[in-house]
Image (cartoon, rainbow, N blue to C red):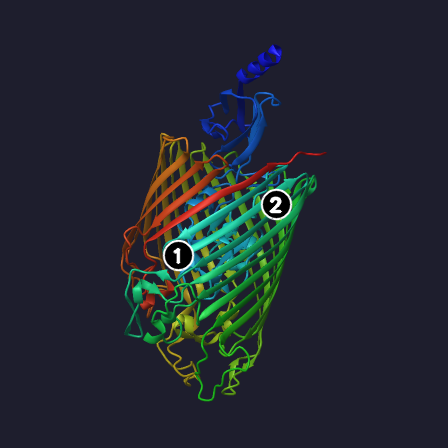
Amino acid sequence: MIILLFAYSAEAQEVFNLRGFVRSVDNKPLAQAHVFLQETRKTTVTRNDGSFEFSELKPGTYRLHVSYLGYKCIHQYSIDLRATHNPIDIIMVPEFHELQEVSVVGQQQHDHDDGTLEVVKANASFLEKNTGHSLIKSLESLPGIQAMEIGQGLSKPVIRGLGFNRLVVAHGNSKLEGQQWGVDHGLEFDQFLAEQVEVIKGPASLLYGSDAIGGVIRIHPPSLSAPQTMETQLKTITRSVNNSLGMSLMNRARIRDWFWYTRFTWIDFADYKVPADSFYYNRYRLPIFNGLLKNTAGTERNAFLSAGKLADWGKVSFTLSRVSSKTGFFPGAHGIPSQNNLLPDGNNRDINLPYQQVEHITASAALLYFLKKGSLHLDLAWQRNNRKEWSAFHTHYPSQQPPLTNPDMEFHWVLHTLSFNTKYSLTTTNGLLQFGLQSQMQQNKRAGYMFLLPDYQKSSAGVFALYQRKLGASTTLMAGSRYDLGNISIDQYISPYTGKQKSPDFKETFHDLSWSAGLLHQLRERLVLKTNVSKSFRTPGATELGSNGIHHGSFRYELGDTTIRSEYAYQLDVGIEYSHGSLSWGLSPFAGYFPNFIFLNPSGSYLLPDGSEVEEADAGQIYRYEQTEAYRAGLESWIRIDLHNKYTIQASAEYVAAGDGTYPLPFTPPFSTRMLAEYKLPVYWKLFHMTTVGAEFVYSAAQSQVARNESQTPAFSLVNLSLSTKILTHYFPLSLDIQIQNLFNTRYLNHLSFYRQLGLPEAGRNAQLVLTIPLETKLVRDRK
């Protein structure tokens, strides 16, 4: 008995030390990584050699949590002190990685390894800290990127003053398709699915097709889990400006050679708040009651599933996704408003007429196959975009009667897209050679009691070759060319109310050659010089060729022109980047010449080009798609300073000038600048770590250089605050990101906002909270 008591006493007094090392996948030590021992609530940081230690631990099982900026956090790493041999090795995986290719990305990186164009990348940490009401709004703090606001909660990208179908948004290697490039259509994508985003600023037509004449926003597929790992994460978000509530649930795993990724997102929001009590429509002043934009509430329901297999020969994956939303239209910005329609209805979360419903379904398959001296990529994708716009039936014809079915469905478009892409990359003794083939087929069908865009079919194919070669130790040459061939067929449409033709039976073939050449020169790893010159072209879209009707959401009558030809652009891009120690700086001037730029021109007339009257009553002024010679030039500059690993100061400025020699082009952004100061707080309490507070100042100059009949916008300035931290609870660490946007509730007009012509300001003060909860992480045993 005495012996047993003595043994028990010795065991009770037994203590252990836990030692380990934190390294990256390429075996480099990670200093200043945060290590949290859950059961003791102790926190430490790794030394310069990546080592850490916890002393005087009682026997038992403990759970470790390890985090490091730019790397995926490790949660609930289970350790049995009696069975574990000290020291342990913890390998961290970068947030941004692909199979057998690792590219570490910080919060925001200017990349000079991807070619001679300016490229910036944003990782998951950056996107969380800058979360906006849409993915494009989240990217707006990157230099050269603006969000064109097309209604509260909706936005589309603008890169260096170019937008609409001059930009490509791609998920992986497949271009997202839909009616999102219409004037009042937003990007149909779950922003919480974006973990890594790459923005190519400038002509990228060689790899992405003719629509990339102005740039590309490439959303990388979700990164894979570490081997033998399963992760579950819940992200919640709330916004005060529209009482938004949302959550996004993710699960991913990698077991042996198989992997999967799933995400489900739910968002509900109420009417938006604006710092205004009235707006203008056609010289009439109308009220905004209680500072709320009536009927701007909405819902979003998204689902994403991806699964695949890794092998020595490469990688294969299959993806299925659905993005679905229902959003109200502000009655004062749709059709002809009346004060009665603007009266409060006592419910800020209901969605009444007018409103829109959008469902975007994508199914795709991707194959990466490794060859002896290169690799082969194959991508096949099918997309179905189903868009409905509902508005109480109203007549523009004397004898127009409501349809027997769906009498309030104003527009209905269903767009099917089938695309196939292949790229072969060959590594040679002198450099890298790439060949590719891209093809696409589209079919659009319309319905509804109004006519704007006809039925059409479109097909295209393009082949390209790109060569990259080292010219000495510090200079790289990149050059390539591409040939595209496309065909569009528009169906004839006869108005059932007037018997007159709204759309002709039209067929046309477009084809041309694009090319690009550039040099990248690096001096002692401090100074990088880039130069790129290119010739690109863009085939006109169905809207530019065949639209013919009242667009209520745009307050105008839009008219296409079947005589429009392909748009050409000759562009010069230059980049200068310098980095030394804690300082990094960059300057990127650019210029472009468009012999036949396509734009929507307010004609100043209420008559059709042949002098006849518009058939619809109350149609308004004719806006016609036309072509003109155009010029574009500007520059971006940015600077970042890191001091003592605690302070970060960064600033950026951008300016664009665009015109046809007589008038500026519409939607040209004004000069703007952003300045951000961040401070990393020391660990005052064991509960919080990696805490950063920031203050951002945004200034936009007045824009007086406007197109004909385009309204000017005054200057404005905004102040935004942010806080980011990790909270160490007894169960798991939480990530908390708080933003206060438009701190002083400033009333301002965004020149890229579609509603500015109504004098309708942007959203008011907004307090936003994003909470990320790692519900579960399991390290699965390898049973091989």
- 376 lies above or below 659: above
Query: On the rendered structure, is 695 left or right of 454?
Result: left
Query: In x, y percent, where is residue 223?
Result: 57, 43
Q: Is residue 207 visible?
A: yes
Q: Is residue 196 visible?
A: no
User: Which residue is more in the foreground, 264 or 722?
Assistant: 264
Calculate the distance from the C-alpha at mark 2 to the C-alpha at mark 1: 52 Å
The label shown at residue 243 is 1
**In this view, which residue lies farthest toward the right?**
784
Does the residue at mark 2 contact the one at mark 1 (Cβ under 8 Å)? no
Which residue has dot 2 on it? Answer: 433
Quarter of the image with the N terminus is top right
How many labels sit on residues? Answer: 2
Q: Residues within 10 Å of mark 1 (few under 14, many from 20)?
A: some
The answer to which quarter of the image holds residue 657 is bottom left
Considering the numbered disc 2 on the image, is that residue within a helix, a strand or a loop? strand
User: Which residue is more in the foreground, 9 or 609?
Assistant: 9
Q: Amino acid at mark 1?
A: Asn
Q: Residues within 10 Å of mark 2 (few under 14, many from 20)?
A: some
Instruction: Tell me the mark number nearer the camera, choosing from 2 and 1.
Output: 1
Q: Amino acid at mark 2?
A: Leu
Query: On the rendered structure, is 496 left or right of 319?
Result: left
